[in-house]
Amino acid sequence: MAVFEITSNKGDDTVSLDKSLKSKSTLVRARNVLKRAERIEKLKFEDRWVEGQGALGLPKVRVEKISIGKKKKKKKDEDED
């Protein structure tokens, strides 16, 4: 097995990453699939969760899609005309 080292000409051992490859900390769009823990939390909130119930075979949970609308333009005061 070969071991490769990445070095740069700057003297430090870091390699820069192109800005197009950097991931954002949060998702911009809504996810349409929940993780198991998120589904259990939602079932508890809706009082559909029974304590001691298995985590496999959970019932479906509706995911509400949030639409981000356009910003409304501010109305100009009629006094300024």
Image (cartoon, rainbow, N blue to C red):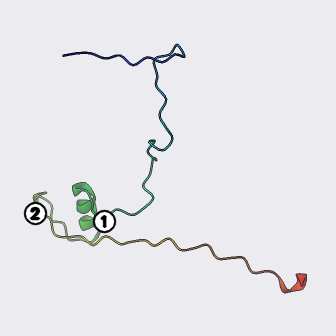
The answer to which of 41 and 76 lies nearer the viewer is: 76
Precedes in sequence: disc 2 or disc 1: 1
Q: How many marks?
A: 2
Above or below residue 7? Residue 58 is below
CA separation in Å, label 2 and label 1: 18 Å
Q: Is residue 63 left or right of residue 14?
A: left
Residue drawn at x 34%, y 62% as measured from the top left: 31
Amino acid type of disc 1?
Answer: Asn
- Measuring from the top left, give residue 35's x and y in whole percent: 25, 56
Above or below residue 10? Residue 18 is below
Classify residue 7 by image quadrant. Answer: top left
Q: Nearer the viewer, mark 2 or mark 1?
A: 1
Dot 1: few (<14), some (14–19), or many (≥20) neighbours within 10 Å?
A: few
Q: Secondary structure at mark 2?
A: loop
Residue that mark 1 sits on: 32
- Measuring from the top left, give residue 1's x and y in whole percent: 18, 16
Above or below residue 66? Residue 1 is above
Q: Secondary structure at mark 1?
A: loop
- Measuring from the top left, give residue 63's x and y in whole percent: 31, 70
- The quarter of the image holding the C terminus is bottom right
Q: Which mark is residue 57?
A: 2
Residue drawn at x 13%, y 57% as measured from the top left: 55
Amino acid type of disc 2?
Answer: Gly
Q: Which mark is residue 72?
A: none
Residue drawn at x 52%, y 13% as measured from the top left: 11
Dot 2: few (<14), some (14–19), or many (≥20) neighbours within 10 Å?
A: few
- Measuring from the top left, give residue 79's x and y in whole percent: 89, 84
